[in-house]
Image: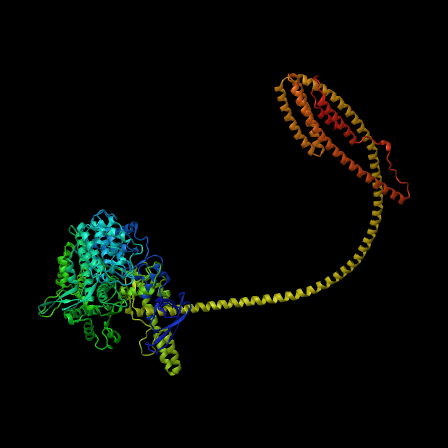
Amino acid sequence: MEPGVRVWVRDPDGLQAWLPATVQSKLALGSAGGGGLQDVEVELEDDDHYGQHISFPCMLGHSEADDIKLRNRDEDDEIEDLIDLPFLHEPAILHALHKRFEKGQIYTFTGPILIAVNPFQRLPLYTDQILQSYYSAGLMRSQGMADLTEKVHPHVYAISDNAYRAMMQAGRREKGAPPVKQNQAILISGESGAGKTESTKIVMRYLTAVGHAQGRTVSERGSVTDRVLQSNPILEAFGNAQTNRNINSSRFGKYIELLFNGRGNLCGARIETYLLEKVRLASQLPGERNFHIFYQLTASRNEAVVEQFGVNREELALGQPQSYRYINQGGIYTLRGVDDAEELNATQHAMDVLRFSQESQADIVRLTAGLVHLGQISFKATTSHDGDGSALADSAEAQTAMATACRLLGVQQDVLEHALTKRTIETRGDKYTALLTVEQATDACAAVVKAIYLNMFEWIVSKVNESIKSEEDWRSSIGVLDIFGFECFEKNNFEQLCINYTNETLQQHFNRYVFKLEQAEYEREGIEWAFIEFPDNQDCLDLIETRPDGLFAQLDDECIMGQRGNDRNFVNRLYKKYCPDPRHTHARFAANVAQRRDFQFSIRHYAGIVVYESEGFLVKNKDELPPEATAVFVSSSRDLMRDSHELYQKNQSARANSGGSTPRKPGRAKRAPTVSFQFKNQLHSLMGKVNGCAPHYIRCIKPNDLNSADIFAKLRTVDQLRYGGVLEAVRVARSGFPVRLPHGDFYMQYRPLLNAEAAQSMPITTSSSPEKAQDQCKQLVNAVYEEMEEEVMAFELRCRQSEVAGNDHAHRLHRLANAKGIGSLLGNTPTFLFDRNEVQLGKNKVFMRKGAYEVLEASRTRRLGAWARRIQSLWRSHVQYCRFQGMRRVAIDMQRFYRGAKARAIVNAIRNKRSAIRIQSFFRMVIHRVAYLRLLYAVEQAQARFRGRKARLAYLKLRYETSAVKIQRTWRARELIRHEAKVRGAVVAIQCRVRRMRAKRLLSELRVEARSVGKLQQNNEELKKEIEELKTKAVKASAVANEKAYKEASGEVKELREKLAKIARELLIEQQKVVAAEREKVELKDVIVIVRQELSETNQLLMEEKSRNSQLQEDYELAREAAERTAAAAGKQPISLARSSNSRSASPVDVLENGDDALSELEQFSDGEESHHSAKRTPLATRRHSSLR
């Protein structure tokens, strides 16, 4: 075990079983001679202990120890068959299963054995398409039409198909061919919750599908395949229960034998059951349930479902399951993801398919409900002249429960009460009746319940067999064994001993089967195998079953003792027989001082040591039914009670006759066979059937105790691999040549051990021909052996020559020998060499014993280490050379940089001097230039100020002159404006008088002509509308201050004039002129109002003009004063700006006053004048308004 080797080490914390690690170093601890120890230091590689170093002791020259194992390559994790692993041991198997479980690959082959890990979830692995693919592949392979080198993926379907094809192939055996077992057996084992029941269902589904006459995967109702499949719901309802490890645990073993005809079609089946767990009927552990059928009946609230059995709910008188003692002790009443009511419906449907009569179904339900009520019976203590006894309690619950139970069971109450409270004892031909205490009566009630349920269960199994039996001649069969797995609890009793005895027997068969497979492979490869030792557990079986000293035989003898026999006497007999001294134990049996104090004993099974408690062994082994209980069955009115009891008695007799009766003392009557005796006979019968079949194995594994998906507990898995016999099978398989490598792998792996000369004479790869590849591997083995032998001889010669050099030199050689793994110095056989017989060359593989493989691996590791060191030295040389070249380049660069820096410093100094001179000259220039610019600026400023003052004076003079001209022009225009206004006012006044006169004449004419009132009214309305529009427009025109709005209003007034003229012309045509005249009058009044408003606005405008004139007058006065001051300053005559008083004209205000007078006169004229002369209608106010504008 050289440094750098990948290994598995046992977890020091004991949580992960095994941890990956790498060997770091090893140190020899023992003396020379190959028998010493070496301390191997490893570095852990898992996440929780990464980088941690621990040490393990290991024998010198050995590559493995109990706590350290060699690790396979990472590529081997994808292997589907564990046999193909180079290193096959506990950690390798555990790691491979873990990796496949993480990928959802729950099935793995170990040779012909299938390991099935329960995923605790639904996986898409059992569809009809997948079933059809395995069926097609098996058919093609059986017909020789498929590639035989292509491996089949591991699956339950693959095992089932192998069994079916082997059965069919054996039936078609040619004449003269060696005999082949035609019947097949699929043995499924595992602990509770590992998936045995589900695997059994999958196997049966596949076999019934491939055995269907029409090749269908779905069976017709009532067909043979349908009846075989429908047997599962019935057996699960009456034989399965929830435990702390599994919600659907089979509490009995069963062997289902599927029968096939010559064409390979399923024609029937038969079922055998073993060791039903009756103790569950009266007591359950916390977290467990009784059998499913009890909860299915109490959970069904649908009356129709119960009536399908031929009874009604009132007859059963069942309530909630929490109320009944026999089904409420575990505190669990429902299953996760399961509806008990639907399961009851499925159970009834299965009974219909299996042809259970309506009366039988009703009796089954009645008896099941009656057992529930029996659990509610309680007793009270009584005292009589015969002694202390018991009787039915006086409580209403006990009385009601007794009456209901008797009614459902069909028995008389006094008969049942007598069977529960009294016992008839027969001694030396005399009989007497003994009273039972309350505790004994309670136990008697539980015994009656167990007997009734066991009889009913066996009767149901017989009815199932009767329904699924073959109706034609069958040729071969495939048996499916669903048996309880190895059990080891904190407290183990008689049931665990029987179960483990069964597993010991099956493990022996398993070991022999694996050993035969090994023999077949050796013979196929042409390997000598006579020297291989076969591990056997026959001594453990002898300890349990042999007469007269076996455990079962002594237990039966103790049961024969009657009242004198007890559990303590039985265990003391075992102590005396097998280990009278606690310090010297039996190979399989042991009992230390503490165990003897508690009357316990331990047995070393193939899976480990199990400690058993002797309490209750005798009672469970006897399992006697008193005569009073027999009377209960005989006197019952229920056919099922009587028939089931008769069937039970018949089966008891058959089992007793099959293996002989229980031994008895002379002179005593023949006693009923004990449970151990019956169970041993049943097991021998089962093994007789299995031995007559070709076996196929499925080992079920439970990955965790939480029944949770995606959790893989390695410690639990290792225990199950050990209990299931997988590790034992591996030990058997690898007891001969544990290491097997194909020729190509062996050649490529160990060709590096050759020296340079030998390597040149041998090819790099092996030939494709198996014969040539075998010859090449043979040459390689011989060459490697000769090279190793020469090396050892040379080393021993050096050791002999070094004896004269002193002890120090010899000690150094001894340490060197230990480092090389030679393990000896002088006179001893060197462990560095291997025996040539330990390496066998097969036709396709190279087989190696562990010693030869360890030597080759050690030499290969040293050779690879030497090459690695050589490569490392060359690499370090290359690294140092590259480092030197780099340092040299750096030194040259540094020198170049230094010279460049020095030259740059000189150049920079010269440049600095020149720059200083330039800066000085530039600075002096700047000083003089600044002085010059300042002087120039002062001169320019003086000139600018002088020229500016001169220009401003000229500008001011020009401005004064321009202002004077404007004032004069304004003053002269004012006189003309006044005169024009006065003339305009007079003209307007004259016009107003003329228009007034015309209006008077027009009004008189209108009055005369106004005869039509309707026409006048119409014209008046139109005129009002126009007046309103005129008002609106006038308001808008008055709101506009600019000249454009004023002109628009004038245009509208002009349009209004035209409209008024048109109306006047229309009025001349109309007859009713008077009404029109009145409307005209109103119109004129409104127009007058509007004109007055416009005159007021005009007056306001004139006032504003007046204020502006005042402002101009003020500006004029200021300008005149400024001119006078300027002239005074210049010494000239002031400018005259006086205005003429005669140039004053009429102001706009006067004109407006005259206009108001004219309007007043017009109003007076319109009110008082009544002239009848017609005149043309003219909007006077509009014309006046336009004239004013």
Q: Is residue 957 above or below residue 739?
A: above
Quarter of the image where the N terminus is located: bottom left
Q: Where is residue 214 in the image (x, y as percent from the top left)?
A: 22, 46
Q: In this view, does 312 lie above or below 525?
A: above
Q: Is residue 1142 left or right of residue 561?
A: right
Q: Where is residue 378 in the image (x, y as percent from the top left)?
A: 21, 62
> Considering depth in this image, is 329 or 954 the residue closer to the camera?
329
Q: Is residue 822 visible?
A: yes
> Residue 257: which quarter of the image?
bottom left
> Considering depth in this image, is 1038 or 297 the residue closer to the camera?
1038
> Considering depth in this image, is 933 or 234 the residue closer to the camera?
234
Q: Is residue 522 left or right of residue 978?
A: left
Q: Give the residue at the far front of this rendering.
A: 1168
> Residue 89: which quarter of the image?
bottom left
> Residue 72: which quarter of the image?
bottom left
Q: Position of residue 23 (x, y in %)?
A: 39, 69
Count of numbered marks: 0
Q: In this view, does 637 lie to the left or right of 1097?
A: left
Quarter of the image where the C terminus is located: top right
> Considering depth in this image, is 880 or 1065 the residue closer to the camera?
1065
Q: How is the image coloured?
A: rainbow
Q: Is residue 1062 visible?
A: no
Q: Where is residue 583 in the image (x, y as percent from the top left)?
A: 25, 77
